[in-house]
Amino acid sequence: MNPPILELNDRARDVFRTVVESYIDSGTPIGSRTISKLSGLNLSAASIRNVMQDLEELGLLAAPHTSAGRMPTDSGLRLFVDGMMQAMEPSAEERAAIESRVTQAGPVEEAIAATTAALSGLSACAGLVFVPKREIVLRQVGFVPLSANQALAVLVAEDGSVENRVVDLPLGVTPSSLTEAGNYMTAMLAGMTLSEARAMMDREIAAERAALDGAARALVEQGLVVWSEDSGRRPVLIVRGQGRLIDAAAAADLDRIRDLLDDLEGKQEIAQLLDSAREGDATRIFIGAENKLFALSGSSVIARPFHGADGRVVGVVGVIGPTRLNYARVVPMVDFTATTLARLMS
């Protein structure tokens, strides 16, 4: 357990702040001799070394190798973010760059993606936005035979979108069973979400009220299971600006960047992390190994939920980058983006 920032004396706080701010700016450790040359501290290199040693024993600083200076640990960054950081509000130009993407004509999804790209460019991080997949409302269902063992299940939603799934056919299914199953589902389930439709069919089949033969009934059950499970696994996660993660400082640490890009490819895990930020209204900051997903890549995520017209959380927007993020600048930028997206959704 790290000490509260107030338990550090003035000298320790000054040295600690200098190390953290230098690391955020350069991405490299800083030595006592360099700190002693900085104006304002009025401390000798020997005094600074002693203070840095104390901070290292507290788990706030670390030396990457014997001859190097010190850099903040994940715990040190957490202490800095929670107790010392002075947030910098986005400039008028930065606010305008974000807002301009929201007001552009076109589908909401495109505006969200464009806003995420703007946030990526301004923060020099990868931009992330997570929107749980909206439940499909059924309009029409049909089954098209592909072979003796498989059929294409076609779902038409109320918004006009069409989704297709290949399903394995239960034994005994005939072309007439396919037609019967599709007509039955359309008549019974139109206007329902997938979860509502599945619950309704479970009740009908359990009560033996479903006017279907055994093969058609099995097909209906299988189709709903496939759609429901697949839909639940596919939240909408937009990632923009991965290339910004490879800067001059990162070039010397390509293994870490490779791990981070691999993390971004595992969108399901990233989506789960962002989904955890939907609770409450506050900005969430995940630093390095605080989250096991980024233990190898040494990355940080800043995320904030945004709301729709009814006040409910409809998504989460944020950024991902190295732990040496400029938190003071990026946190307010993420906050402003969330506020802007909330206006779009209202």
Image: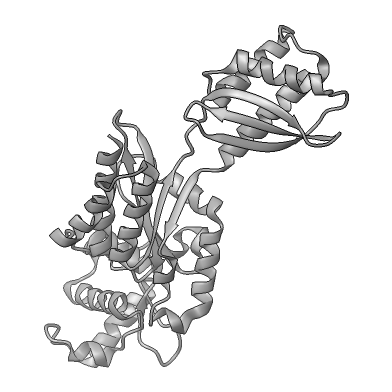
**Quadrant in the picture for the C terminus:** top left
In this image, 280 relative to 228: left or right? left
Q: Is residue 207 above or below residue 201?
A: above
Whether residue 4 is visible here, answered yes or no, is no
Residue 174 percent coordinates (x, y): 84, 23
Where is residue 124, by image quadrant? bottom left
The residue drawn where x is 62% and y is 18% is: 186
The residue drawn where x is 21% and y is 62% is: 6
Give whichever of 141, 80 is nearer the camera: 141
Q: Is residue 290 above or below residue 39?
A: above
**Quadrant in the picture for the N terminus:** bottom left
In this image, 237 relative to 45: left or right? right
Q: Is residue 14 above or below residue 44?
A: above
Give whichever of 73, 149 is nearer the camera: 149
Whether residue 121 is visible here, answered yes or no, is yes
The residue drawn where x is 20% and y is 71% is: 9
Residue 49 percent coordinates (x, y): 29, 87
